[in-house]
Amino acid sequence: MEKIIDENTQGNTLTLEARDGNSRKLYIESYGCAMNFSDSEIVASILADQGYNTTNLLEEADLVLVNTCSIRDKAEQTVRKRLEKYNAVKRNANPKMKVGVLGCMAERLKEKFLEEEKIVDLVVGPDAYKDIPNLLKEVEEGRDAVNVILSKEETYGDISPVRLGGNGITAFVSITRGCDNMCTFCVVPFTRGRERSRDPQSILREVDDLAENGYKEITLLGQNVDSYLWYGGGLKKDFKNASEMQQATATDFAQLLDLVATAHPKMRIRFSTSNPQDMHEEVLHVVAKHENICNHIHLPVQSGSTRILKAMNRQHTREEYMKLIDKTREIIPGCAISQDMIVGFPTETEEDHKETLSLMEYVKYDFGYMYKYSERPGTMAARKLKDDVPEATKSRRLTEIVELQQKHSAIRTAEFLGKTVTVLIEKESKKNKDEWSGRTEHNNVAVFPKSTYKPGDFVKVKVTDCTTATLIGEAVGLAP
């Protein structure tokens, strides 16, 4: 088991309502982080204007796109297996089908994808989605098509994304693209480029549109939301010095969060992902100020060892991270905190591992995402550090971390027993068709009997039982 909740590695086939007059079929499948799912909505919007409606039937598709992840080798292997599936369908059922690879894996492999995977007709990086119509023309004329050029300006802020396969209740709103934090294990700066922040007015317009269409919850999304800074466009690093940046009229993440929460007090707001080195105290005060901002912060730490954090080029120490945890709980009492953890990073010793376990004991995270280190080509760690922790040791350490997280998750969910929580109904429970499933402001999944409630309702639920990941209860009425 690699993590408590595995939503970041699952593939979803995404569809939207058919647009009248469109005759071609698009099958789009997404893997990886939430940003990839958000990007797929942008791609579908671009292609809807080119005559494509989405389908969930692979065999009938004119165009098949897979939006890929390069964070771990496992994610890339999953995509390769899917390409084998597409190849079989194309060979046996639909020879006119065209297949493209999008996202981080496309950016990393570039033209090699066309050489290695004969099924692939086009390769499109994360900043080149507006060029897909031109690339499709290249394909139709019998040429391979590649555009993986990274941009310093592209944010897709001018595109209104369609909501693919969603529930009409929750939605992602992208606020930044790229990342300037050069963590030695991470390919994102190479596959998604430099940090760019989106115009706050375009973000507010998108949230306005979601509210008008009945959405009840949004997640402000970025590789590192806390580094959001809008001052008219371009790169932060284009400024010659800090004083020059300060002289510009700027909106930082705390201000953006406050703007969105104030504009839509009935909309529940989440954000992800935060980087400890960029999480400022003012953000915590904004969360505490607004009832509609969820009391949950995803705060990846990656390791409990300062020595390993330095090797990872994480710009914080163990002690600084613990102070941030303390400050968070001081300003936002009861705030849920979740983590990302990498096990078996090069040179990790048993003492380093014990420091990770002790950090987890200090924080007692509500839930977490835990992985064995996977060497990614092109990263500083791959170039400079030998992957020297034996696989058996990685597996044993991962098991210990997962088991400890399950223990802490059980403690955290048990804290809600006998209490009443507000749940936004999202869908029918997978395990019981007579129950609704939704999430609390602390990001706990909660299930309860359906009664007369419906998806999109905010419901007060009294918690009567729990597992390590789920609250179980009875509805006591609609939330005001």
Image (cartoon, rainbow, N blue to C red):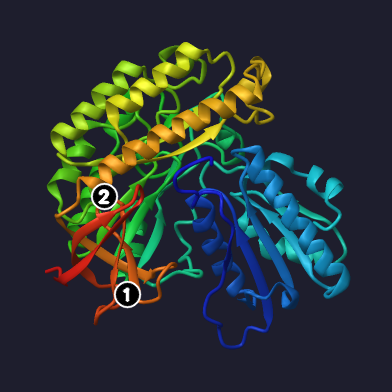
Farthest residue to the bottom: give it.
20
Residue that badge 1 annotates: 455
Label 1 residue SS: loop
Is residue 304 visible to us here?
Answer: no
Q: Which amino acid does label 2 sit on?
A: His
Towards the viewer: 241 or 444: 444
User: What is the x, y in percent for residue 218?
Assistant: 33, 59
Instruction: Give the residue drawn at x 44%, y 57%.
Output: 157
Disc 2 + disc 1, Cβ < 8 Å: no
Towards the viewer: 281 or 317: 317
User: What is the x, y in percent for residue 147?
Assistant: 71, 50
- In the rendered view, tell whether residue 446 sits above or below residue 340: below
Farthest residue to the front: give it.
465
Label 2 residue SS: loop
User: What is the x, y in percent for residue 177?
Assistant: 48, 45
Instruction: Give the residue drawn at x 57%, y 88%.
Output: 20
User: What is the x, y in percent for residue 49?
Assistant: 59, 74
Residue that badge 2 annotates: 442
Give residue 409's quadrant in the image: top left
Q: How far apart are marks 2 and 1 (CA)?
A: 19 Å
Which callout, 2 or 1, points at the residue further toward the start of the chain?
2
Q: What residue type is labelled 1?
A: Pro
Quadrant location of the C terminus in the rendered image: bottom left
Position of 345 compared to 97: left or right? left
